[in-house]
Image (cartoon, rainbow, N blue to C red):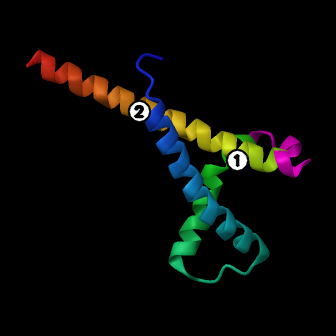
Amino acid sequence: MKKFSGRVFIISTWLFILLLIPSFIAGFGEDEGTLGTNIIWIMFAKLFYILRFPTHTLFWSVVTKNTVFYFGSLAFNCMLYGLLLERLDAFAKMARYSNSTQQ
């Protein structure tokens, strides 16, 4: 990984964690049947299905055995998404730099 930006990684990971908190609450409310019809909370509930991928989708039987595994895997997902966002940012910077040097 060339030119890894730790700052972008940390900021993007925290962004996903901040999105995970209300989406976890909304997902819990949807599972319990107490979510209601507020469009914002419904969107957060649907976002939880995205943010819990891949660990909760692929390793559900392992993740549900322990609370530490459950929330640790959610944190791992946020770090994975943070890494993907950091790599996309690095790719965009590289593409922008190569386009500016070719002209």
Front residue of 102/5: it is 5
Asked if residue 48 lies left or right of residue 14, the reply is right
Q: Which mark is residue 74?
A: 1
**Over which residues does the magenta segment extend?**
57-68
Q: From this view, report whether residue 30 is shown above or below residue 91.
A: below
The residue at which mark 2 appears reads as: 88
In percent of the image, x 12 and y 16: which residue is there?
102
Q: Where is residue 53 in the image (x, y as percent from the top left)?
A: 66, 45
Q: Mark 1 to mark 2: distance in Å?
A: 21 Å
Which corner quadrant holds the C terminus?
A: top left
Q: Where is residue 71 in the image (x, y as percent from the top left)?
A: 76, 50
In percent of the image, x 72 and y 81: which residue is there?
34
| Occupied quadrant, residue 57 | top right
Q: Residue 21 carries which label?
A: none
Pick out the residue farthest to the left: 103
Front residue of 57/81: it is 81
Give, as a three-letter code, the residue at label 2. Answer: Leu
Front residue of 22/58: it is 22
Q: From this view, report whether residue 103 is shown above or below residue 15.
A: above
Task: Count neighbours of disc 2 (C-alpha within 10 A) and say few if under 14, some if 14 to 19, many if 20 or more.
Answer: few
Q: Position of residue 15 (x, y in %)?
A: 51, 51
Asked if residue 9 lies left or right of residue 26, the reply is left
| Occupied quadrant, residue 37 | bottom right
Asked if residue 20 lies left or right of residue 94, the reply is right
